[in-house]
Image: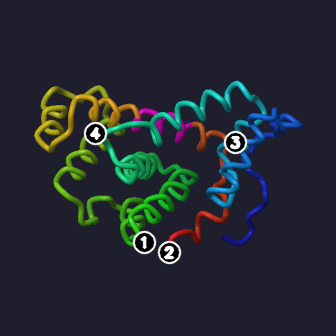
Amino acid sequence: MTGTTDRITALDLPAVDPLPEQTQRYFDLCQDRLGLVPNVLKAYAFDIGKLDAFTAMYNDLMLGESGLSKLEREMIAVVVSSINRCWYCQVAHGAAVRALSGDPALGEAMVMNWRAADLSPRRKAMLIFVEKLTRASAEIEETDRQALREAGFSDRDIFDIAAIAGFFNMTNRLASAIDMRPNPEYHAQAR
């Protein structure tokens, strides 16, 4: 995108300098594994306690043990972010869907209109639930949870689906509120 700047957010919240050793090691690990330090981490680096809380929850939900595949977790992140029109998460997690699936078109469909994607009945059921949870959480009923069970999800999986959707609904709102910018590298990944 032309005219972009190097800013991460619209707020002037400088990172702790120097970063604590453990935080610097985590940033170095991100750089080694991802080829970048995600801007969301840099945005939190003004307060190491908040950064640690964010990364602990993110790592548990997105990388921890679950009956959901990493791709399914990223699909949830993208669908929630698409509904919420969170540019940061659409770009970052759209890239993750492309990379994990090996299918650039799937990543685009998840961002633009997940219903256009060729998905299994299991994944469709998951994303129907995620969409309803994002748009009208108070309207979730037992029939919604039962539809997930019938699609093959355990109650633990249902908890994980809801937790991931809830987490991204929160982070989308924060990212939008502070105008968090995606790392430019995400745009070209896995295409």
Q: Measure the alpha-carbon separation of dots 2 and 1.
A: 6 Å
| Residue position for label 1 | 104
Which amino acid type is shown beneath numbered disc 3?
Tyr
Which amino acid type is shown beneath numbered disc 4?
Lys
Q: Looking at the image, is mark 4 or mark 2 nearer the viewer?
A: 2
Q: Measure the alpha-carbon separation of dots 1 and 4.
A: 26 Å
Q: Main secondary structure of the magenta part?
A: helix
* Residue extent of the magenta highlight: 164-173
Q: Looking at the image, is mark 1 or mark 4 nearer the viewer?
A: 1
**Mark 4 or mark 2, which has the lower sequence index?**
4
Residues 4 and 147: in front is 147
Residue 26, labelled with which disc? Answer: 3
Q: Looking at the image, is mark 2 or mark 3 nearer the viewer?
A: 3
**Mark 3 or mark 4, which has the lower sequence index?**
3
Residue at 84% x, 34% y: name it: 16
**Mark 3 or mark 1, which has the lower sequence index?**
3
Which amino acid type is shown beneath numbered disc 2?
Arg
Residue count near mark 2 (Cα–Cα under 10 Å), binned few <14, some 14–19, many ≥20: few
Residues 57 and 147: in front is 57
Q: Secondary structure at mark 4?
A: helix
Residues 101 and 112: in front is 101
Q: Tag count in the figure?
A: 4
Q: Secondary structure at mark 1?
A: helix
Residue at 54% x, 59% y: name it: 91
Judge whether residue 167 is colored magenta: yes
Residue count near mark 4 (Cα–Cα under 10 Å), binned few <14, some 14–19, many ≥20: some
Q: Measure the alpha-carbon separation of dots 4 and 2.
A: 30 Å
Residue 114 in the image: state x and y as whole percent.
Answer: 32, 59
Q: Quadrant of the N terminus?
A: bottom right
